[in-house]
Structures are given as structure tokens and as C-alpha cells.
């Protein structure tokens, strides 16, 4: 009788042990599934954070001192980029390459439209429509914002403010 | 004896079932939180606001006699007052300028990020009723899902309202 009870107890212990192993395995599987799920969304989170940063940057960049029209123009303008200033900045851009923490920054004039794309430099300015401010040649995704691209023009001997419609583009790299 | 064993086995089955239900509930809660995470909007109001602000600052081809070229904001007032530019009719220049800006700025259509837009300029009395529509243009599919921006500024005890709506 004692022997039979002891065998039953052993069976019971074995049963409990198997049950515990099964539950542990079940939780481990759930954990593995959850971690895998989280890791896959982590890359998406990094990309969306970079996109958010680019979006924030693109909205404040036009008002940064390196770009903004400031008081050089007759009336205070918001979202206004001084293209003369940007052209000078482009000549000395190496000092600013990592300042904003993004891959590319460019300005594309959209109205009035030119017949073809012409990248701006000191020889063709202002008869051009693309200002590559920071260019690393990376393939990324752009966040963009409408800005007024203003410069000083002269009619006769009188200077006046000439503002055109442009988009300021900031690119960030997508995490693969 | 068999009955007692059967009962115990049933209890164990119920216990195991309960554990599975608890785990399933936890997983559903995690999934729900994940799915309820706010998704990125395709476009925001600031895009419309920046567009209107930028368009209003655009230097038009309308030359004020003996003075500078007018920006779009000034040209709207000029058109409302039926004043002539040195080089043409102010309202014609206003129309062609806005049409050009809209055409080059927005690529609309089915399957695109923005399906349509509507741009309006009107002069409103202080009571809020429309006195005169200066410009109105819409393009594409004007769906129920819209966002936009209205810029208003005073003009001779009236309000000039420039509104832009994007439809997705």
C-alpha cells in the first residue's frame, strides 16, 4: 500500500514537473514572440523619430539666423529664407555639415518655374532653382516646408525685395 | 477513488485553461496598445499655413506706378480697390499669379497624398457676411477629410480672408 502511494506521489510530482515545464515553455514562447515583435517595431520607431526630427527642423530652419531674412528686408517676414545669405553659407558649409544633424538640406524654387533644373552656384545665381546646402548623396526621405525665398533685386538704381515660392527640404535616412 | 482522480484531473485542466486565458488577455492588451498608437498624419495644418504665408509674401509682377513691385497680399487689396498696376490689370495679374503658384505647388489626384484643394480669397464685412469674392479655385476631389488654414487681415473696416483647404 505504502509502495503504491509512493509511486502515485512520484507520478504526481512528475505530472507537476511536466506542467511547470510546459507553462515555462509557454511563457518563454510568448516572451520570444513579444521581443521579436518589439524589435521589428524598433526600427520603425527610429525612422519615425528621425522623420519627426526632420519635420521639426524643417519648420524651424527657415527662422534660424543662418537662413532667415531678418531685418534686411523692408518688412518682417515669417518663413522667409534669404537666398543671398544661403549662397554665402553654401561656400562655407563644411563648418556646418553636422550642425543640424540631418543628411541633406536643400531649397527648391517652385514658382516661378524654370524650364529645367539648374543647381545654384556663384556663377549662375539667381538664375537657378536648386540650392544644395548640405549634400551627402544619401538616399533618404525628405520632409518639406514651403518658404519664401527672398533676395535683393535692383530695378533702375533702386533696390527692392524679390520673394519667390520655394520648398525647404530636409532629408533623413530610413533605417532598414 | 476513480471519481476523486477524475475531479482532480478536471481541476488541473481548469487551472491550465485559466493560465491560457490570462496570457491571452495580456497579449490582447499589448496588441490593443500597439494598434491604438497614433499613426503619423500625412499632412498637417502647418503645411497649409506655411503655404498661405509663403504665397502671400510672393513678389508679383504688378508694379505700383513709380514704386516697387507688390507682394500678393498687397495685390489682393489693389485688386479689391480696382487699382491698376503700371504693367496691367491688378486682378488679372492676381488671378494668373495664384493659379501659377497653386499649379506648381500641389500635385493632386486620386491615389496621391492630396486628392484635392480649394483656395479662396474673399472680403468680409465686420458682421461676417461675404461682400466680394476676389478669387476662388478648387482642383481634384474635395473629400470630407480636409485640413486647412485661414489667414485674415483688416482692410478699411472689413476683413480680407485667404483660405486654403487640402483634401485627402
Image (spheres, coloured by chain):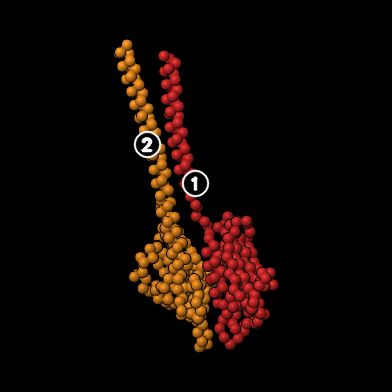
Chain colours: A orange, B red
Q: Quadrant of residue B144?
A: bottom right
Instruction: Say which residue label 1 marks.
Output: B35
- Nearer to me, A159 or A41: A41
- Nearer to me, A37 or A91: A37
Q: Residues within 10 Å of mark 2 (few under 14, many from 20)?
A: few
Instruction: Say which residue label 2 marks.
Output: A28
Whether A24 is drawn above or below A68: the answer is above
Image x and y of residue B165, in percent: 60, 63
Q: Which mark is residue A172?
A: none
Image x and y of residue A113, in percent: 54, 71
On the picture, is B110 further left or further right than A150? right
Q: Secondary structure at mark 1?
A: helix
Whether A61 is drawn above or below A45: the answer is below
Q: Residue at x 34, y 26 (%)?
A: A17
Residue B95 shows in this picture: no
- Nearer to me, B7 or A67: B7
Q: Residue at x 49, y 44 (%)?
A: B32
Q: Secondary structure at mark 2?
A: helix
Which chain does tag 2 point to?
Answer: A
Amino acid at each position: 500500500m505504502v509502495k503504491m502511494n509512493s509511486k502515485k506521489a512520484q507520478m504526481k510530482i512528475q505530472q507537476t514537473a511536466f506542467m511547470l515545464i510546459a507553462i515555462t515553455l509557454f511563457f518563454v514562447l510568448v516572451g520570444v514572440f513579444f521581443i521579436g515583435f518589439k524589435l521589428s517595431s524598433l526600427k520603425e520607431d527610429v525612422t519615425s523619430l528621425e522623420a519627426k526630427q526632420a519635420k521639426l527642423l524643417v519648420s524651424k530652419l527657415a527662422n534660424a539666423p543662418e537662413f532667415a531674412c531678418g531685418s534686411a528686408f523692408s518688412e518682417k517676414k515669417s518663413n522667409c529664407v534669404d537666398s543671398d545669405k544661403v549662397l554665402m553659407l553654401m561656400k562655407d558649409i563644411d563648418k556646418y555639415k553636422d550642425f543640424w544633424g540631418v543628411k541633406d538640406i536643400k531649397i527648391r524654387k517652385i514658382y516661378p518655374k524654370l524650364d529645367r533644373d539648374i543647381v545654384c552656384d556663384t556663377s549662375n545665381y539667381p538664375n537657378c532653382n536648386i540650392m544644395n546646402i548640405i549634400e551627402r548623396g544619401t538616399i533618404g526621405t525628405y520632409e518639406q516646408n514651403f518658404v519664401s525665398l527672398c533676395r535683393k533685386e535692383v530695378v533702375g538704381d533702386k533696390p527692392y525685395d524679390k520673394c519667390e515660392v520655394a520648398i525647404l527640404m530636409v532629408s533623413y535616412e530610413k533605417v532598414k | 477513488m476513480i471519481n476523486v482522480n477524475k475531479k482532480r484531473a478536471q481541476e488541473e485542466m481548469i487551472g491550465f485553461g485559466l493560465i491560457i486565458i490570462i496570457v491571452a488577455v495580456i497579449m490582447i492588451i499589448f496588441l490593443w496598445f500597439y494598434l491604438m498608437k497614433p499613426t503619423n498624419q500625412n499632412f498637417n495644418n502647418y503645411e497649409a499655413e506655411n503655404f498661405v504665408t509663403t504665397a502671400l509674401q510672393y513678389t508679383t509682377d504688378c508694379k505700383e506706378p513709380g514704386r516697387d513691385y507688390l507682394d500678393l497680399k498687397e495685390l489682393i487689396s489693389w485688386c479689391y480697390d480696382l487699382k491698376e498696376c503700371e504693367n496691367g490689370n491688378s486682378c488679372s495679374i492676381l488671378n494668373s499669379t495664384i493659379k501659377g503658384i497653386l499649379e506648381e505647388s500641389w500635385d493632386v489626384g486620386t491615389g496621391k497624398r492630396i486628392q484635392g484643394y480649394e483656395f479662396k480669397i474673399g472680403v468680409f464685412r465686420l458682421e461676417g457676411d461675404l461682400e466680394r469674392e476676389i478669387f476662388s479655385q478648387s482642383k481634384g476631389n474635395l473629400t470630407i477629410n480636409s485640413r486647412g488654414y485661414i489667414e485674415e487681415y483688416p482692410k478699411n473696416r472689413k476683413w480680407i480672408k485667404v483660405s486654403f483647404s487640402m483634401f485627402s
